[in-house]
Image (cartoon, helix red, strand yellow):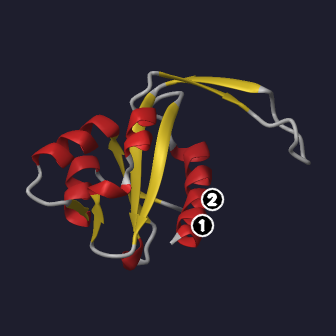
Amino acid sequence: MQKREAQFTTKFQKWLKYEWDKEPSAYFELKVSRGTSLPFSDVKDHQVSNLLLKKVIHKFSDALRWGTLFDVILCTGKGYVVIQYYRLRNKEFFIIPIKVWLKEKATSDRKSLTEDRARELSGSYFLK
């Protein structure tokens, strides 16, 4: 599963660079589901807490071989859960605001989010 998420992360970063125009900074937690739904429990409590932050400061490691673009970054933005349902084997994915994710988790009769419901909550996005 981690290999699939790593592959999706690489593709999503490229998509984000050229296609994202909703806001200048945001936080994303990426998930890949092997089945027809993603358990709400797959987004851990500490990930939810971090996605709810209004401001994030990150210090990049100076030990990287290739160097860094800069030392510190300050981001102010919204958090999102990004889901790719791998079984579809296509380039479609869903970007759900964390507050929408939490509301769905609290009100759903299910313990997981189906692909169809994710589409209703966010609309579809496609990798190129």
Say what amino acid the circle numbered 1 marks: Gln
Residue labelled with disc 2: 10
- Which residue is drawn at the image coordinates 79% and 27% (left, top)? 71
- Which residue is drawn at the image coordinates 43% and 78% (left, top)? 89
- Which residue is drawn at the image coordinates 37% and 43% (left, top)? 45
- In the structure shown, which secondary structural element does the residue marked by tag 2 occupy? helix
Q: Is residue 103 left or right of residue 54?
A: left
Q: Is residue 99 left or right of residue 5?
A: left
Q: Which mark is residue 29?
A: none
- Which residue is drawn at the image coordinates 89% and 40% (left, top)? 67
- Residue 91: x %, y % from top left: 46, 67
From this view, report whether residue 79 is shown above or below residue 128. Answer: above
Residues packed near mark 1 inside 10 Å, few (<14), some (14 to 19) or many (20 plus): few
Residues packed near mark 2 inside 10 Å, few (<14), some (14 to 19) or many (20 plus): few
From this view, report whether residue 74 is shown above or below residue 1. Answer: above
Front-most of 74 and 127?
74
Q: Can residue 115 be seen at all in this image of the molecule? A: yes
Give the Cα distance between marks 2 and 1: 5 Å
Q: Residue furthest right?
A: 65
Say what amino acid the circle numbered 2 marks: Thr
- Residue 66: x %, y % from top left: 90, 47
Q: Which mark is residue 7?
A: 1
Q: Are marks 2 and 1 in contact (CB under 8 Å)?
A: yes
- Residue 65: x %, y % from top left: 91, 48
